[in-house]
Structures are given as structure tokens and as C-alpha cells.
Image (tube, rainbow, N blue to C red):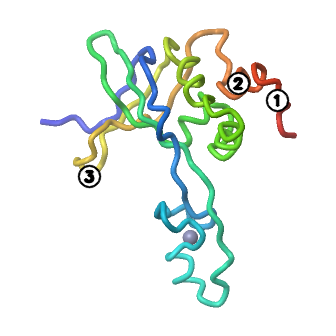
Amino acid sequence: MEDKKPTTLMCTVVAIDHTNFCYRVCSVCEKTLPDNNTNSCKYCNFNNKFNPNSCSSKRLFRILMSIATDTKVVVVIMFDRAARVLFGCSADEFFDLAKLHPFAAVVAGRFLEGEMLRVTLSKSKNGNAQHDRVVSVVPLMSGFRPVIETLRESYGVRARS
Ligand SMILES: [Zn+2]
């Protein structure tokens, strides 16, 4: 029998997939927008016929991460709320930084490699998703700093106020 309850475990970050770390959603209803049309949301247009231009898009984190537990290495998927803990910013802010500094995502991955985390994982509800989902994440090393802080420091960028 499959255990559907979330499990909490200690792990270290082996790697993150820096090639594809975010996706776009409608900033009003947060439904995923197709890559080829991120300017209008069919859900909002449908519900809001008289003001179809009222929505815009924003990015949310969606990151594949390999973690090593005491017994194995697994790939898990981390969505916006958990990823923000590690990145310390929104996906849009990170994307803006990465536009100016093309290797920001690669460097971010390197910063995170070896970090010790306590993660809570849950199986997907529909049962056909490939990867367990990170529900929450707590960095365990006392000196942990969110990725964006270290990146801004090394690029000499001031934080947006
Ligand atoms: Zn929408």
C-alpha cells in the first residue's frame, strides 16, 4: 500500500536544474499560461469579458532538485513557496537578475549544492506526477543565506527596496 502522507527528512542538495526554473502564470488567477501566449489569460478573459486586458503574467518558481537522503538520491520538484525560502526572492526578481547575469541560475545551483535541508515531501495527489513535491523546506546550516543575497553581493547589485 502506498503511503500518501507527507514525509519529513534530512537531505543535502546534489544539484538543481538551472535550465528551467520558472513558469508563467496569470497574475490575477495564477493559472499557468502557455509559453507562446503569456499576454492574455483565457480563464480571466472568459470570466472577465468586459475587461480582457486586466490581467498580466508573472513568474513562479518550479525547480527540479536532486537531493541525497541517507539512503538514496531522488529528484523532487519544488514550487514557488518552498523555492522562495532558498532563493529569498520572487521568481520575477530572480529572472530579472538572470537577464543581466546569464550565469546566475548556474551559480545559484552551485551555491545550493551541499546545503543541508529538512524537507517535507508529499506524493502528488493524482498519482501520475513523476516527482514527489517539496511542501516545505528548512535550511539547516546556521550560516545559510538565501541565494539572491549572495548573488547580489557577488554582482554588486543593490536590493530593490
Ligand atoms: Zn487569469
Q: Position of residue 2 (x, y in %)?
A: 17, 36
Query: Nearer the N terminus, badge 2 or badge 1?
Result: 2
Q: Residue at x 22, y 48 (%)?
A: 128
What kind of element bears circle 3? loop
Q: Amino acid at mark 3?
A: Asn
Question: Residue at label 2?
Answer: 151
Name the residue carrying label 1: 157
Above or below: residue 64 compared with residue 27: above
Answer with the quarter of the image where residue 131 lies. Answer: top left
Give the mark toward the camera: 3 or 1.
Answer: 1
* Above or below: residue 135 compared with residue 154: below
Going from the N terminus, do you reach mark 3 or mark 2 first?
3
* Contact flag, marks 2 and 1 (Cβ < 8 Å): yes
Secondary structure of the residue carrying tag 2 is: helix
Label 1: which secondary element: loop
Nearer the observer, 77 or 3: 77
Residue shown at 57% from the left, 31% from the top: 105
Residue sitting at 34 percent across and 14 percent down? 69
Amino acid type at circle 1 is Val
- Where is residue 60 shown, x and y percent of the image? 56, 48
Image height of 103 relative to 124, above or below: above
The residues tagged by marks 3 and 2 sit, at their Cα atoms, a distance apart of 37 Å
| Residue in the image at 35% along x and 28% along y | 7
Q: Nearer the viewer, residue 35 or 62?
A: 35
Question: Label 3 vs label 1: CA separation?
Answer: 42 Å
Reading the chain from its start, which is encountered first: label 3 or label 1? 3
| Residue assigned mark 3 | 126
